[in-house]
Amino acid sequence: MRTPCFIIDEKNLLRNLEILKRVKDNTGCKILLAQKAYSCYATYPLIAKYLDGTTASGLYEAKLGKEHFPGEVHVFSPAYKRGDFEQLLDIADEFVFNSMAQLKKYAPAAKARGKGVGLRLNPECSTQDHAIYDPCSPGSRMGVRARDFDEGALELLDGFHMHTLCEQNSDALAKTVEALEEKFGKYLHRVKWLNLGGGHHITRPDYDIPLLEKTVRRLQDTYGVQVYLEPGEAVVLNAGELNGTVLDIVSNGIDIAVLDTSAACHMPDVLEMPYRPPVLDSGQPGEKKYTYRLAGNTCLAGDVIGDYSFDMPLRIGDRVTFLDMALYTMVKTNTFNGTPLPDILYRKSDGELMTVRTFSYDDFKSRL
């Protein structure tokens, strides 16, 4: 097995899907795969056995869902381009618009084609600390505030959409739903569906599933709406790994292991979020005997993954395995510096390792 490579683990993927299916069975809600977090379509036939469809952030994701995932196709864009929207009319089942202007511009054409039409709402209720992922932050471009809502547009609407969470538990959802009802509750009886977006870490061990199910059932019973959830991370949480190899070890106040995998190219959320991905058999700096800074092999000085400790010293040629690497990784990889893209492998439940996709120089060249 050459590195770098992603490995998607079927056993853990199935564990997540079983949890999501129980939520569906217990509440009657529908659950869609948010492709922005995970778009490895080789696994779509398996996921489609458990979920109801896909969500897309634009034309290409919508086409991928339509082609490879049986079920509903929902699409949301902060602003649609005319050409993309016209193509989406042949693909999407439900359109969600981000502003009153976009709604009034495009909804009549969608309705004429028998498509569902929704509007993204901003409940102005921040429950997280990651400003880059907070659609309710001051000055956000995401969603319509109550003060800007035009009641005259209700005749165009089949549903409402909100998405405010990021890797959060159901207490944050319950709090946000309260804000939604306070600001928009008088309109909820007027629509057919309510999409609560993503960011629900439903498959995390400490996630309060009973509170989620209680919230979903109450909304459906109170307003007569079909509730949708569209998790991305929860579908593939802890279902992937990224393997790299130590190429060199240098010292500059700390021992630095230079790998053939990169934060900048292969896991950019490490730099954007930022966060420290888990590494197999490692500890916090100083927790184990040998501490290293793990870094990428690009010319970016800040291509640093983080500091980790190990029981044994790292040596050139050793394998380093990053965990929870299915979400927001393969969809965000890039070829900065001409860095090769990691192969994508699939570990079946019986342990067999299958190659899904390999990449070459042509994948770098063809983008330019």
Image: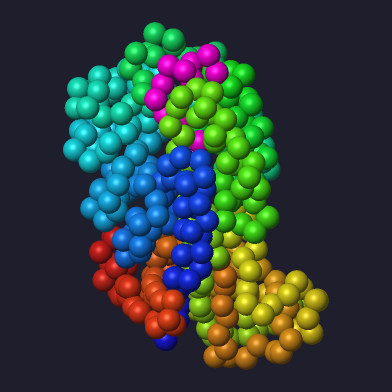
Horizontal side of residue 189 vs 318, given as left or right: left
Q: Considering the image in quadrants, where does the N terminus appear?
A: bottom left
Give the magenta range: 185-197
Residue 225 higher or lower than 282, as above or below? above
The answer to which of 359 and 337 lies nearer the viewer is 359
Q: Which colour scheme is used?
A: rainbow
Residue most toward the top?
152
Residue 365: x and y in percent read 28, 67
Judge from the rendering whether residue 52 lies leftward or rightward of residue 280; answer left or right.
Answer: left
- Total number of numbered discs in the rendering: 0
Q: Nearer the viewer, residue 256 or 212?
A: 212
- Residue 198 is situated, as x and y percent measured from the top left of the image, at 51, 43
Can residue 340 be seen here? The reply is no
Q: Position of residue 214 (x, y in %)?
A: 60, 37
| Residue 187 is a magenta residue | yes
For the point 39% across and 51% down, which residue is it?
51
Depth order, front residue of 255/245: 245
The picture quadrant where one finds residue 318 is bottom right
Q: Which residue is drawn at 27% across and 38% down?
A: 92
Is residue 304 shown above or below 63? Answer: below
Q: In this view, does 318 lie above or below 64?
A: below
- The answer to which quarter of the image holds residue 43 is bottom left
Which residue is pictured at 42% across the width and 57% down the height? 38
Q: Can residue 40 be seen in this view?
A: yes
Among the 4 quarters of the image, the one containing residue 285: bottom right
Measuring from the top left, give residue 56's x and y in whole percent.
36, 44
Is 364 contained in the magenta span?
Answer: no
Taking the spot 57% from the left edge, 56% from the top edge, the residue there is 203
Picture quarter with the C terminus: bottom left
